[in-house]
Image (spheres, rainbow, N blue to C red):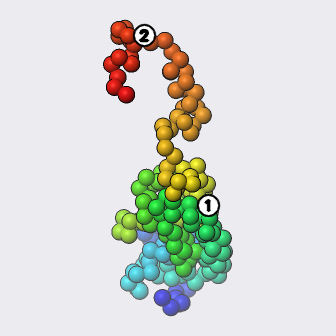
Amino acid sequence: RPAPTPSPAIANQTVGFGKHSNLLVKDLFAQQPDYAAWLVRSTRSAAPRSPMRQVGDYISSLPEYQNAVTEEKAKAEAILTDENQAILAGLKITAQQNPDGSITLRGKTYDRQDDLRAAGGRYSKDSRTYTISAAGLGQFIERSRADSGAAGGQRSSGPAYSRDVELRKLRENADNRPDRSGLEGGVDNYLSV
């Protein structure tokens, strides 16, 4: 959309909607930059005179916001290396940089939703995608490196205790306990392997 020309009067009004409705519009980006950036992205298709669009236009006109977008774009370009794209491809996830420097993730994200949310990813039910910052994507990739091996990025095979030290110790402890089940010949006679 063309560069917005918001009314200066809106700066001293409260946001009036959403979880930060009591903040002044002029303070929203300084106090809640992630929410403000999300709001700008979310209001691009809103009616021009709607309160949300007016707030989004005001925020996107701020020099601080424009500087932050420039920085985010550079970070996104730096994180979307061929190596990291290959890791994501192994997870059957694609990444696309957005005009504001955020990154949209598509594909097989359901199995990774906890990691994506922990890294600050926001899910959109409409587009069935996650939007994440470059820093968040870096965190997500680091968490995923262990699961994306040379075999096409498939999750490591085998049980979880083979990858987790604490679970492995618990499993070894359980395996070394004597069988007190009272079953003749031990448990193996009753289990089909």
Give me the C-alpha separation between circle 1 and circle 2: 48 Å
User: Left or right: 150 with respect to 109?
Assistant: right
- Considering depth in this image, is 9 or 178 the residue closer to the camera? 178
- Considering depth in this image, is 177 or 184 the residue closer to the camera? 184
Residue 174's place in the image compared with 84, above or below, is above
Instruction: Name the spot of residue 82 as percent of width and height, x first.
Output: 61, 69
Q: Which mark is residue 180?
A: 2
Considering the numbered disc 2 on the image, is that residue within a helix, a strand or a loop? Answer: loop
Residue 179's place in the image compared with 17, above or below, is above
Instruction: Name the spot of residue 146 as percent of width and height, x first.
Output: 58, 49
Of mark 1 and mark 2, the one earlier in the sequence is 1
Residue 106 makes an appearance in the image? yes
Considering the numbered disc 1 on the image, is that residue within a helix, a strand or a loop? Answer: helix
Quarter of the figure with residue 106? bottom left
Instruction: Name the spot of residue 55 as percent of width and height, x first.
Output: 49, 78
Which quadrant is the C terminus positioned in? Answer: top left
Q: What type is the residue that disc 1 sits on?
A: Gly
User: Can you tell which of label 1 and label 2 is closer to the viewer?
Assistant: 2
Instruction: Name the spot of residue 105 as percent of width and height, x first.
Output: 48, 66
Q: What type is the residue that disc 2 sits on?
A: Arg
Residue 133 makes an appearance in the image? no
Question: Counting other residues with Cα less than 10 Å from the Cα at mark 2, is it few (<14), some (14-19), or many (20 or more)?
Answer: few
Question: Counting other residues with Cα less than 10 Å from the Cα at mark 1, is it few (<14), some (14-19), or many (20 or more)?
Answer: some
Q: Which mark is residue 153?
A: none
Q: Residue at x 54, y 79 (%)?
A: 99
Q: Residue at x 50, y 91 (%)?
A: 2
Report the number of numbered marks: 2
Q: Residue at x 63, y 69 (%)?
A: 81
Q: Which residue is mark 1?
A: 138
Q: Residue at x 33, y 19 (%)?
A: 190
- Considering depth in this image, is 166 or 130 the residue closer to the camera? 166
User: Left or right: 8 with respect to 179?
Assistant: right
